[in-house]
Each structure stands twice: as structure tokens, then as C-alpha cells.
Amino acid sequence: MSPAPAAPRVLLVDDDRELTGMLVEYLGREGFAVEVEHDGARALDRSPSVDADLVVLDVMLPGRNGLDVLRALRGRERAPPVLMLTARGDDVDRIVGLELGADDYLAKPFNPRELVARMRAVLRRASDRGGVDEPVSLGPLKLDPARHRASVRGEPVELTGAEFRVLETLLRAAGRVVSREQLTEQALGRKLELYDRSIDTHVSNLRRKLALQPPAEPEIRGIRGAGYLLTLPGGGA
């Protein structure tokens, strides 16, 4: 009889002690091993020893705010995926968080069931590649999923986990339009919600990082009302 899989390790960083107490109990019942920190600076000091599979990180924190913590985590060589918690309707925090490399976000107040669904989607995308690890390329752009490496003309490009999956999805469908709904489901592991602009932010980040500008490079084109298309100048794939 094979041993049961280890519970995913989660570092929950939020200064709302009533909320974290409730979430520790709820997430424990859902099969997560949760450790809590209420201060941003202490969370950074503690995160290497926790060896978390996922960080659930509130934006509003004492010590160092969540965006500072996210920026510092993304500067580390082996950073866990991060799900940000933002205030309801605070698009600035959400967009900045995604630009800094958050894998997903959830606005407060939230249903704990939705949090669990988002957490599982992020963890699944971080660990389950579905057996598709072969390198893929288009012109000077190359992706090596097995090693999580991206390069343009041999020069490495640092991408977050979400950005890498968005680019890989577009690259494997090069020359064909991929809808925002498909990108959200395939790259982020969840359904596209009304007013959800996460994919657009990730695509904007990719354009900036890869400098995909025609006519010399492949380009990510937005097709109004349809989605996004990765193609060579002139429409080649």
C-alpha cells in the first residue's frame, strides 16, 4: 500500500488573527499543513525555514507590506508560488502584485471554498505538467518546460510561473488565436471571471520582458473580442 501524499505546506501571512485562526482550521480540514505569520518582515525571515509549497500573502501587513514581501520572494532563487489577498475593488494592488510575479490573487472578503480552489489550482500548475516537457520554440524564442527556462536568441529571460505558463500556452498554439478564457483555464487553472484582467496583465509583462516587437521578433498580438495570438511578423508560425 503506497503512503499517503504529504500535505501541501502553506505559509499564510495576514495580520487579521481572527481570519487566520479560522483559515488554519478550515484549510487543515481540506488537507493543508498551514503555518501563520502576522508580520511581513518576520514572514520573510521565516519563509526559508518553512519551505512552503505555497504562500498566501495579504497586501496590507505591518513591518513590510505584502508587495514588498512578494518582491523580495521573487528575488530568491527558489521562490514558492504566491497567491495574493487584496482589498475588494483595489485594482492597483492587484495589478502591481501580478506585475511583481504573483501567481494569482483573491479579493477580500472571500469564500474559503474559493480560496481552496485557487490554492489547489496554483499548486497543480506549479507541480503537474501533464507529461508535456518537450522544448518548444518560435524563431529566436525558446522554452524548456522541464527546466522552466525561457530564452530569446540564447539570452535567458526570467519569468514567473504564471507568465511562463501563459507564454507556453501561446507558443504551443503559435499561429492560432487563444481566447482569454482558454488562457485563464490552461495557464492559471481556473475559470475566467467577469472583470478579471489577470491574463492581460501577464501578457503585458511578457511583452515587456521579452521585448517582442515586430518586425524582428515574434509578437503577441491582441485580437479584439477573440484573445491573443503569438506569431512571427507577417503571420508565420
Image (cartoon, grey):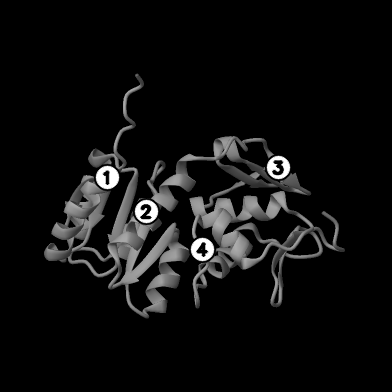
Residue at left 38%, top 46%?
Answer: 79
Residue appearing at x 21%, y 62% in the figure: 14
Please tell me which residue lies in front, 141 or 13: 13
* Image quadrant containing the N terminus: top left
Indicate which disc residue 191 carries.
Answer: 4
Q: Is residue 101 left or right of residue 28?
A: right
| Three-letter amino acid code at the position of disc 4 | Lys
Q: Are marks 4 and 3 in contact (CB under 8 Å)?
A: no
> Which residue is pictured at 59% across the width and 56% down the height?
166
Q: Which mark is residue 136?
A: 3
Tag of residue 119: 2
Q: Whole-Å distance between the Cαs marked 1 and 2?
A: 10 Å
Q: Nearer the viewer, mark 1 or mark 3?
A: 1
Of tags 4 and 3, the one toward the viewer is: 4
Q: Secondary structure at mark 3?
A: strand
Sequence-first tag of 1 and 2: 1
The mark closer to the camera, 2 or 3, is 2
- In primary-sequence order, the first of circles 4 and 2 is 2
Q: Classify 10 Å Cα crowding around label 1: few (below 14), some (14-19), many (20 and above).
A: some
Instruction: Provide residue 111's location: percent of width, then percent of height.
Output: 30, 67
- Please state if 149 lies on the left or on the right of 178 as rendered: left
**Is 139 rendered above or below residue 200?**
above
> Split into 4 quadrants, where in the image is the C terminus?
bottom right
Q: Which-is-in-front pick, marks 4 and 2?
A: 4
Question: Badge 1 is on which residue?
Answer: 32
Foreground residue among 28 and 87: 28
